[in-house]
Amino acid sequence: MLNPRAKERLNELHGMLIGLASNEGDMITLMREAIESWEPSDEFSARGTVLTVGDGIATVAGLDNARYGEILIFPGNVRGMVEELKRDYICCVLFGDDTFITEGSTVKRTGKTAGIPVGDAFIGRVVNALGSPIDGKGRIKASGYMPIESPAPAIIDRQGVSEPMQTGILCIDSMFPIGKGQRELIIGDRQTGKTAIAIDTILNQKGKDTVCIYVAIGQKASSVAQICATLKDNGADKYTVIVNSSASDPASLQYIAPYAGCAIAEYFMNEGRDVLIVYDDLSKHAIAYRTLSLLLERSPGREAYPGDVFYLHSRLLERSARLSDKLGGGSMTALPIVETQAGDVSAYIPTNIISITDGQLFLESHLFFEGQRPAVNIGLSVSRVGGAAQTPALKNAAAGLRLTLAQYKEIEVFNQFSSDLDEATRARLRHGKNLMYLLRQEQYRPLEQYEQVVILTAAMANAFDGVTPEAVGALKYEILDYVKEKLGDICADIKNSGKLSKENRALIAETAKEYLAEHKNV
């Protein structure tokens, strides 16, 4: 009597012979060639045996042909992914409860690599790292299935970054612009407003036909619920997908969460759409991977992280790109977030991700506590690509802004040790301080590009120099409304063309000063 495995092989050969029956030619010859050349393929129905299980890790024997990244089925329909290939056994990370998995349990191959369902129906939903809905709104009808890990687009398949990805935040769009297809790191200590910048950027995509993906890695469930409520209150849930792997989830789910979010983003990018994806945050992702690696008995390296932790994030962030027109011209812009300890950007994970990304926004605690929010450090922050995508109008309006603020910072330090300053230096101090207050921006209040141009044009023309710094915050919105009323055609032209002529710049500056002259009581 044949054993089950032999039966499976004979059935496979039988199916192949039946397929030949419909072909033209000598049937005997075709059968002889088929039998001589036939080799049984990998038996995806092959079964293995659990050797050990614990802490979300299972070792399995008997699956010699299993591949790295393949999904296995454990008792209780628990999924596991092959993460380590040893000589005599394989190691798997489990994506569910291992209560019913014991030594000697049977494991089955699927032949499929880890993937996630994708489709337009995911927009507006909250899913876990496996793509299952967790928002209580019922099942999601998927349009396809994407592997969570795939090769980054080749150089020939990309095109240069030339379109802006507006954040709506004045200090970022003016001095550290981000382009579609760029990877801009948001880095800083805990509670310095990193997530706030990402959420404001998502809110600013309203009406811009951009799909946003927010990936929460190791966050508190209450924090993610609050973000969901914020997006819904501002109407951003209609174009946003949230992938959540909270702190209570196993390390294996936190590990695959950013890759799952990236796979959903790739689906929309391949459809020719623009995508913004936020990874919040990759320092917790690295910790989850370190946990898995130590359980897999991999040798720890610097700061106890495994040696391939750089590859962990590079193969994720390299998938962000702006595709060529031949491939639809879609783009994926990544905003990874990394948490530092006491502002130490030279730590292992921060230096890794800084070297992978195309720039960073460094947020400082002391600026945040001084009320300078967003607390962007102008000296340490940089955008290596986005300047090419900045609109001519904003580039014109912000010309000299960064240099002026750098000079102000130097004079401010010098002023701490000297009170005897000439009037020209005092005027620079007042101007610089007013600019710093101008760059303060309320949360959930993004600015349109033309609004930023109007405010910066007035500021660089010294329109705010005659007012107190504390009054600048409210005054900039008043001037903005006044210019919109008086120069509506110019504002519309800036909004549509993205350009600012010398004549229009002079008119905006003159109108702003005219408003201030009528309101000297400020």
Image (cartoon, rainbow, N blue to C red):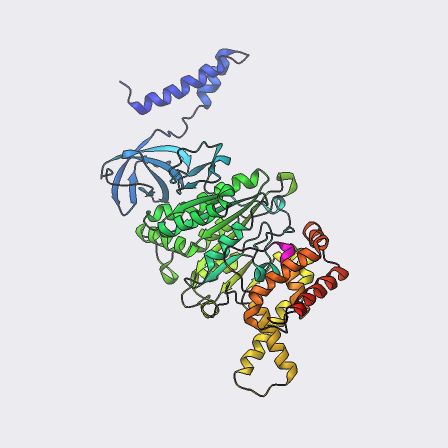
Q: Is residue 33 above or below residue 289?
A: above
In this picture, residue 236 sits left or right of residue 178: left
Task: Say whether residue 99 is visible.
Answer: yes
Relative image position of residue 460 (x, y in whole percent): 66, 68
Q: Give the residue at x 33% y 30%.
A: 46
Residue 464 colored in magenta in the image: no
Q: Quadrant of residue 509?
A: bottom right
Q: Is residue 15 above or below residue 82?
A: above
Q: Quadrant of residue 178?
A: bottom right
Relative image position of residue 198 (x, y in whole percent): 50, 54
Relative image position of residue 231 (x, y in whole percent): 47, 48
Residue 450 colored in magenta in the image: yes
For the view shown, which residue lies furthest in the left direction?
A: 103
Q: Quadrant of the C terminus?
A: bottom right
Magenta-drawn stretch, dominant element (helix, strand or loop): loop
| Magenta stretch, residue numbers | 444-451
In this picture, residue 3 sits left or right of residue 398: left
Q: How many marks?
A: 0
Q: Nearer the viewer, residue 308 or 372?
A: 372
Q: Nearer the viewer, residue 130 or 55?
A: 130
Q: Is residue 354 above or below residue 431?
A: above
Q: Quadrant of the N terminus?
A: top left
Task: Say whether residue 175 is visible.
Answer: no
Relative image position of residue 72 (x, y in whole percent): 35, 36
For the view shown, which residue lies furthest in the right direction?
A: 503
Q: Nearer the viewer, residue 87 or 19?
A: 19
